[in-house]
Amino acid sequence: MHRILGGNPLSVLFRLFVLSIVVGMILTLFGLSPFGLIDAVQVAILRVYHMGFSAFGWLFQYFLIGAVIVVPLWLIGRFWALSTRSGSERR
């Protein structure tokens, strides 16, 4: 238990208790509360989540716009290659 906690369990608990009070006082000076921090984390996660899926929406839109040009050109190129290949085999 000593190796896991880094010292005597009662001593570690006391240090964590005192450190929690000090950090709590400092955060209160900045106007932060536990519920405010939890809300801020939730909002940040939701923003990243929505940005990620909106990025996929833009990506799909760019794909469609590009596919309108690329796919017909690819098909023309494939047909052209097939016609020239079959024309060279006739000779």
Image (tube, grey):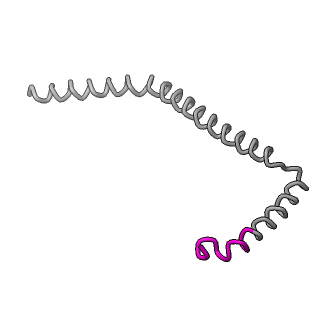
Q: Main secondary structure of the magenta part?
A: helix
Across and down, in percent, residue 81 comes to 24, 29
Q: Is residue 11 magenta?
A: yes
- Vertical placement of 73 versus 46: above or below? above
Q: Where on the picture, by quarter, is residue 30? A: bottom right
Across and down, in percent, residue 91 comes to 8, 28
Across and down, in percent, residue 80 comes to 26, 25
- Vertical placement of 79 versus 10: above or below? above
- Residue farthest left in this picture: 91
- Residue farthest front in this picture: 10
Residue occupying image coordinates x 88% and y 59%? 25
Q: Which residues are magenta?
A: 1-13
Q: Please state the total of marks drawn on the protein image.
A: 0
State left or right for residue 31 relative to residue 64: right
Please tell me which residue lies in front, 49 or 57.
49
Q: Is residue 53 magenta?
A: no
Please tell me which residue lies in front, 19 or 54.
19
Across and down, in percent, residue 52 comes to 59, 37
Residue occupying image coordinates x 74% and y 45%? 38
Where does the N terminus fall, quadrant-wise?
bottom right
Q: Where on the picture, by quarter, is residue 10? A: bottom right
Residue occupying image coordinates x 34% and y 28%? 74
Residue occupying image coordinates x 53% and y 32%? 59
State left or right for residue 45 relative to residue 15: left
State left or right for residue 78 relative to residue 43: left
Please tell me which residue lies in front, 71 or 29.
29
